[in-house]
Image (cartoon, grey):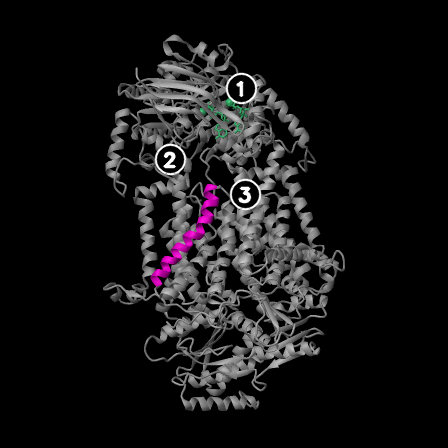
Amino acid sequence: MDIGELILSTVRMATPILLVALAELYSERAGLVNIGLDGIMSFGALAGFMVCFITGSPFLGILAGAMGGILINMIYAYCTISLCAEQIVYGMAINIFAPAVASFIYRIYFGVSSTLAQDTLMKSIAIPYLKDIPFLGKLLFDQTPMVYFAYLMVVFTAIFFNKTKKGLNYKAVGEYPKAAETLGINVIRQKYVACMICGALAGIGGAYLTTCYVNTYSDGVVAGRGFIALSAVIFGRWSSGGVLLACLLFGFCDALQLRLQIMNTSTPYQLFQMIPYVCTLVALAAFGIKKAGPKANGKPYMREER
Amino acid sequence: MKLKKTLMSVLVPLASVILAFVIGAIIIAALGGSPVQAVAYLFQGAFGTPNNFASTLVKATPLIFTGLCACFAYRCGVFNLGGEGQFIMGSIATCWVATTWGIEGPGAMVLCLLCGIIAGGIWGAIPGILKITRGLNEMIVSIMLNYVATLFMGLLYTSVLRDGNVPQTAAVPDATQLQRIVPSLRVTWGIVIALAVAAVVQYFLFSTSKGFQLRAVGLNMTASRFNGFSVKKYILFSFVVSGAIAGLGGSVELLGTQYRLISGYAVGYGFDGVAMALIAQLNPVATVIVAYFFAVLRTGANTMQAGTGVPTSVIDIIQALVIVLAVAGFALVKLPQIRQWLAGRGGKKTAEKKEEK
Amino acid sequence: GAASKPAASASGSAAASGSAAASGYKVAMVCDSSISDGGWGAACYNAMVDAAADLGWETAYSDSVAQSDYASSITSYCDLGYNMIFLPGNQYSDATVQVAKDYPDICFAVLNGAEDLPTDNITSILPNADEIGYMAGALAGLMTKTNVLGFIGGMEIDTTKAKLAGYEAAAKAVNPDITVLSAYAGSFDDTAKGMELANGMLSKNADVFFGDASAVDSGARQAIDTANGDGEIGIYDIGQPADLLGQNPCVICSVVTDNAGMLKLAMQDAQAGSFGNKTIYGSFENGCLSVGAFNDELVSADIQSAYMDFIDQMAAGTFPG
Amino acid sequence: MEEILRMEHITKQFGSVYANRDINLEVRRGEVHTLLGENGAGKSTLMNVLFGLYQPTAGQIYLNGKPVKITSPAEAVKLGIGMVHQHFMLVEAMTVFENIILGDKRTKGVFIDRDARRKEITELADRYGLEVELDKPITEIAVGAQQRVEILKALYRGAELLVLDEPTAALTDLEVEGLFEIIEKLKKENKSVIFISHKMREVLKISDRITVLRAGQTVCTVERSETDGAKLANLMMGRELAPSHYEKIEQPGEPVMTLDHVSYHKASKHSGLNDISLSIGRGEIVGIAGVDGNGQSQLAQIVTGVLTPDEGEADLKGSKVAKFTPNGFIVENVAHIPEDRNKMGLIGNMSVQDNIVLKSTEEPRFSDGHGAHLKKKAIHEYALSMQEKYDIRCESVEQETRNLSGGNQQKVILARELEGNPDLLVAVHPTRGLDIGATRFVHDSMIDARGKGCGVLLISADFDEVLEISDRIIVMFEGQIMGVYPGKNPPIEEISLAMAGK
Ligand SMILES: Nc1ncnc2c1ncn2[C@@H]1O[C@H](COP(=O)(O)OP(=O)(O)OP(=O)(O)O)[C@@H](O)[C@H]1O
Ligand SMILES: Nc1ncnc2c1ncn2[C@@H]1O[C@H](COP(=O)(O)OP(=O)(O)OP(=O)(O)O)[C@@H](O)[C@H]1O
Ligand SMILES: [Mg+2]
Ligand SMILES: [Mg+2]
């Protein structure tokens, strides 16, 4: 097996999940569990694809994905933050609503054709010097800008939550919103901001699929990646480094299983497809996780409630 | 006062549902369809003929099971997102027994149901055991197990249990199938089993001491431990029972509706169940009603789509709007400001009464 | 990349299609994938629309239907007075049989239906999957330089398995040294999976690809195009079921299935009152399968004629042996 | 003296309940103004209105004579109001340092300037004599230390008007002294303090003026110099409270619970036990005195079966305890009033009646067939009788306990724990945060239980309470027993020294 190809594939498969997992991380750090990632992604995927298709610019596509993600996530934000409604239900609702809207728009605009419309893919940009590192350089430093963006986001997120004042305040909102409020932090605003970041990143994750990964949009492009991202956040113990590792593990297992499938055509392919899930379970069981995440996660916040 | 509150909590969601349909009607009209006609199709699809009415019940049956599955676990404070996997494992066990053991008839049917219960219970026990022994988050474990169960089912119908030239298993023999309640209608005894389970769960949770303790554990684990309830036992128990309910649901679905495993079997049932249980505020009887409402929406929507010819996605959009607006309506009446406003008039009286005391 | 132009918008479906005099007949399709998937769903939808246009039928469709909704969707159309329900796949067999019992006057046409499926009101439409495989395999065998071929399936369904078997058999008949790599995406719409699977095969030197995975195939073609880069095209893809030449630079030829033709036969039966109890086969012989246009730059005239020889042999029943 | 704050006609309604009704309050610059009232009188509500956490239903606030509208705590902070809340507003997942600098708006810059901030905080802590360990997570410090962090948080923000809502409930006498010194310093800096406490001694000592609230309404505002404890109690409750005196028992009955060389997480001095031997006899109250966080919680949890000791043995009613489970102890008739009523004692989202029968739903009087069918009517009637007997004030016994006032929550626990005539009662900080009336009620109940032959283990950080009702006093320090003293005429000096580890 070609190790280089495997690593490259791991990075490629992990990137969209990573972006979306970071989206969820920002959401949950503010106490908002959002299981509507699949939905946000599919809308981002469509928005990114259409804008890229029309303008020819993948970067505008990514931007559109972010805007689309924010737009869709505002439904979730308003209902769960302002109306204090159940977060899981709204995540579900987004998962039904957003892909349907995306599919509807695609159908109206592109109609029915025996071939899929294709957009321009974002070009890789090699990073000078770093790309010359033997073996790894070509694999890790000759990627599309969005891959670099995803990995920079990991670093940025780690710094933001651990070293900055705003990050500290942000975390407090997810841990104990009332305490945050008494310290003069605007909890409601922070939660809305969290939803915007979450929507933007998840939208970018979706747009990545259609502007950096494959050059077409189809209704099922997201294929459950949102739920994998959700798991990656829990697995990564709500830290950006942990989330990165979880996504890489997942990407690696997936890349590996695809290759094993090609090598062993006689074994039922479902056995290989189980590998990522079973690996995650085994890894979880081996390490154990006692940490439960932000304390006020999933709980609605009403200022005047005790 | 109380009456007014109940009234509001019915009226507001109802208004929300109507609002969702109004929005849907606008979309349909914009696409050149007739909204009135569309609603007529919806009702025709859900209740138009005795068989359509029966189909709606058939459609509601698996949703009731997965809803109750979520409801039971959440009552004990554990988030079982694995209803789908447990449902599938129940179906798998049932399918295996019904089609490969060479037995037929009502006895075989009962055995199949039992095996479904056991398989679902075992699949549900896994996240429970991992939670109480290793402290693993049950949500992630149960999501992963959903994927494993779905793939395992795929493995069975494409190779191990495959029957004939398409990727599907053999059908359950006629004699083992759940029989129709009325021969001319499609609905089987499955719906009766579902309602019975709902009644039992309702009774258990609210009228027995164990159910009482389980709810206490769900609301405050620390206090429950201090008050002598074995929290870990209850967690495991709730996972097993919740898995068993889903497993039974899978068994009923296989024996009464689908008869065989095939690609796309049970997709989405698990998360539908979670949403329904939460919309029903974890009340088993309300879960049944919400599940029925979902079923009405789905069967009706199929006819509406077929009749009006709007793209299928429009129907999904309307369905999502119904959830979004109905739940928002529920949440709205619970907001302090709104409650305050509702209490507005009756308020003074209560306060004065208290002072007399 | 070559951006294809958006096709005419198809928002409604109840709208009568086609210019032929309205016959008063109506056909509806119930499909589990999206009809704008640029693959199976789209091909089947277009087949129905084309067939209906010729005969002056009205069409309607429900797409993205969940497995548990097959029966109620079909029932809806029956209740709405459609004359024929078109079901593009074997997975609808159970639901079809169930509903067909209650609606003896309505015709059900199941594409890829089993041979034992037909009843008084059910007809199977069965393109010959073996032949599709042979046609692709022969060309792949002629074109490969590395002697490694790739095949990507969506789900492990029988027609796909038959196509794979035929592909492998024909390729080996052309060139015994060939090995065929195959894999299933487990999905018909996860394009990214298609890309990864193709990449995996590319790293094992596969240089001609064929697939049966709907939208997943477009991911695979994209991976091939990327591997070819801007230079000379050395890795190829064979398209199906429509003629895909020109969609991607790597497409050298297509195995074209004329589903519309077969469906039209079924519709004519319905009009004539002779519907049911039969299987309409689609093969190269009866013109329902055909070889699409060649990319003349990539496929030399010699190879084209050698290939057509094999096709003739296949028609004569002597290939692949 | 110049007025800093005036609150006029403040009314605050929760649903149909009036928590504040037409309240007037006026606070002057440089004074300590005390709010006095029973549990649920509306003190915290009024302060939360001032702090912008609640929006008043009606009323107007003036700061320095100018009308202001305080729409959020952020606004209040900007206006120079600081508040130490009754319930800790500490983020448990963060360290002491992080909790103090949270939401800081005074300093510029994106990053946390750890060194500079630490220096600043350390200086501040030194100036006011507040000892805190900046790098410890909140979960690892004792309740008293958490209270100090809360005070430090408020001081760090430098308010002109500081609200202290029951800051002394979890402090030792020594720490209270320290707090009072801080308040005096603030007064000298011409800052104003609104102080809330149920401890009359403290109120009398520190206040300049006192405003008494009753049932959400202002009773009156009095000068400290013109009043005394009895008068205040009368104003507050609308009735006289006779001075209490409890007889001390010198000869206890046979032991109900004996600990023999018990250790638990020995190494951790503040949350472990080191070689503890003690015995509680029937009909006596054994009081554990000591600064909070010296192993008291662990001791309480071992004698109620929640924790299992690492070493040593326990004897319950004459037989060795084989397995430590809460249920095992409950079956043996051990009652527990846990230290945190909301976290450990009550299921907040369940009703008063459900909480009252929490442990006994399987008894024949509340269910048929060993819990197979609950007798809801019997439960309801029983709860009504308990409401009567324990004077639980609530709208109905079907109301969720979460919404009751602290005193009434505690009474629900008492009704549950004492009704079974326990053989051993373990009471941890049973009167923390309770008003004098409720405190008296709890003490009377414990004495009653003692009279019925129950052995009582009282753990309290309130030294006065321990002195008042214990028949025997044990002092704990860093997980060890420092000494055992008689409850009658206890050597107070000696005990105080022992509590400090000397
Ligand atoms: N959130 C609430 N909703 C409805 N009623 C409430 C709520 N909170 C308190 N009450 C009721 O308001 C009344 C006043 O309560 P409160 O506990 O203050 O009484 P109290 O006499 O001061 O009690 P205590 O014995 O503790 O001094 C009680 O009947 C109480 O149950
Ligand atoms: N957020 C709230 N929601 C509903 N009721 C509340 C709320 N906050 C306070 N109350 C009710 O308002 C009344 C006054 O409560 P408050 O907390 O102000 O009393 P307090 O005087 O501070 O009592 P304590 O001495 O126990 O602290 C009580 O009846 C209480 O139950
Ligand atoms: Mg009270
Ligand atoms: Mg208070």
- Nearest the viewer among C302 and D415 is C302
A161 relative to A265, above or below: above
Quarter of the rendering occupied by the C terminus of chain C = bottom right
From where the camera sits, is residue D318 visible?
no
From where the camera sits, is residue D388 visible?
yes
Q: Same chain for the residues at labels 2 and 1, yes or no?
A: yes
Q: Secondary structure at mark 3?
A: helix
Amino acid type at mark 1: Met
Instruction: Classify mark 3: residues with Cα within 10 Å, few (<14), some (14-19) or many (20+).
Output: many
Q: Is residue B15 left or right of residue A159?
A: right
- Where is residue B97? Give x, y as percent: 66, 61
Q: Is residue D397 magenta?
A: no
- Where is residue A94? Give x, y as percent: 49, 52
Q: Quadrant of residue A4?
A: bottom left
Q: Same chain for the residues at labels 1 and 3, yes or no?
A: no
Residue drawn at x 50%, y 61% as measured from the top left: A104
> Which residue position holds label 1?
D446
Judging from the image, mark 2 belongs to the subunit labelled: D
- Nearest the viewer among B41 and B117 is B41
Mark number, residue D138: 2
Amino acid type at mark 2: Ile
**How far apart, in angstroms, are the residues tagged by discs 2 and 1?**
33 Å
Furthest-right residue in view? B183
Q: Is residue A7 left or right of residue D445?
A: left
D403 relative to C273, above or below: above
- Where is residue B307? Give x, y as percent: 62, 62
**How far apart, in angstroms, are the residues tagged by discs 2 and 3?**
39 Å
> Which residue position holds label 3?
B329
- Which residues lie in the magenta part? A58-82
